[in-house]
Image (cartoon, rainbow, N blue to C red):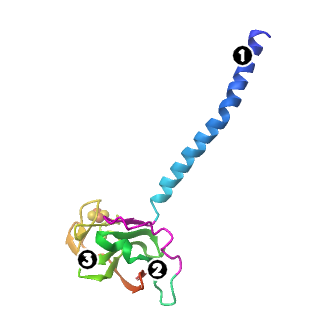
Amino acid sequence: MDRRKFLSWVGTGALATSLPTLLAACSSSYETSKESTDSSTENIVTSDSPIASSPKSEISDTPDADGFYSVGTLAAVATGGAISSKKFASASGSLIVIQDPADSDGVVALDARCTHQGCSVEWEDGSFVCPCHGSAFSVDGSVKEGPAEEPLAVFETKIEGETIFVKPA
Ligand code: FES
């Protein structure tokens, strides 16, 4: 075997041997990337409580006869947690639900889009806080601190058993 044939044979063998590993690595990388992209728009729960679990399958795609969507359980908002979604009832877009600080049997649901420039507010230390420019809103949606000037929209809610339902505006 001359030198050129030998090098060609070794190169083909090395490629054939490493191909499955390369494909697996690319596939794994793709899956991870896809998951991170998807998670940016999925429904999430933030909570200090270990009993909170992912409500991904709990937010219904269709309303009941009265126009309410099931969005999660009371357990998901217990002890300071919040249910939030950027895909809620597509027409309304963004949702945040917390346990009512004045009534532990109730919940409060608002449109999470900050009225300043539309970032999603988060529930922090008794206020809905916008991470973009620092606006803060009360539980009833009213502005506590600007630059936002308009209140957050409040959604109607109902509770059946352990399930929370929200009606978009
Ligand atoms: Fe919320 Fe600017 S978008 S403060």
Q: Is disc 2 in contact with disc 3, using a CB cutoff of under 8 Å?
A: no
Quadrant into which the N terminus falls: top right
User: In the displayed structure, would residue 11 be above or below residue 84?
Assistant: above
Write down the residue under mark 2: 70
Does label 2 or label 3 sit earlier along the sequence?
2
Q: Distance between the residues labelled 2 and 3?
A: 21 Å
Whether residue 110 appears in magenta in the rendering, the answer is no
Whether residue 61 appears in magenta in the rendering, the answer is yes
Ligand 1 placement by image quarter? bottom left
Q: Is mark 2 on a helix, strand or loop?
A: strand
The amino acid marked with disc number 1 is Leu
Other-residue count near label 3 (Cα within 10 Å), few / some / many at <14 / 14–19 / ≥20: many
Other-residue count near label 2 (Cα within 10 Å), few / some / many at <14 / 14–19 / ≥20: many
User: In the displayed structure, would residue 107 be above or below residue 136?
Assistant: below
Which segment did they paint magenta?
Answer: 43-62
Does label 1 or label 3 sit earlier along the sequence?
1
Visible residue check, residue 113:
no
Residue 23 location (% of width, % of height) = 64, 40
Name the residue at the right extreme: 1
Residue 6 location (% of width, % of height) = 75, 14
From the viewer's side, name the closer residue of 92 and 70: 70
The amino acid marked with disc number 2 is Ser
Write down the residue under mark 1: 7
Name the residue at the left extreme: 145
Write down the residue under mark 3: 139
Majority secondary structure of magenta residues: loop
Residue 7 location (% of width, % of height) = 71, 16
Quadrant into which the C terminus falls: bottom left
Q: Quadrant of residue 44?
A: bottom left
Q: Is disc 1 in contact with disc 3, using a CB cutoff of under 8 Å?
A: no
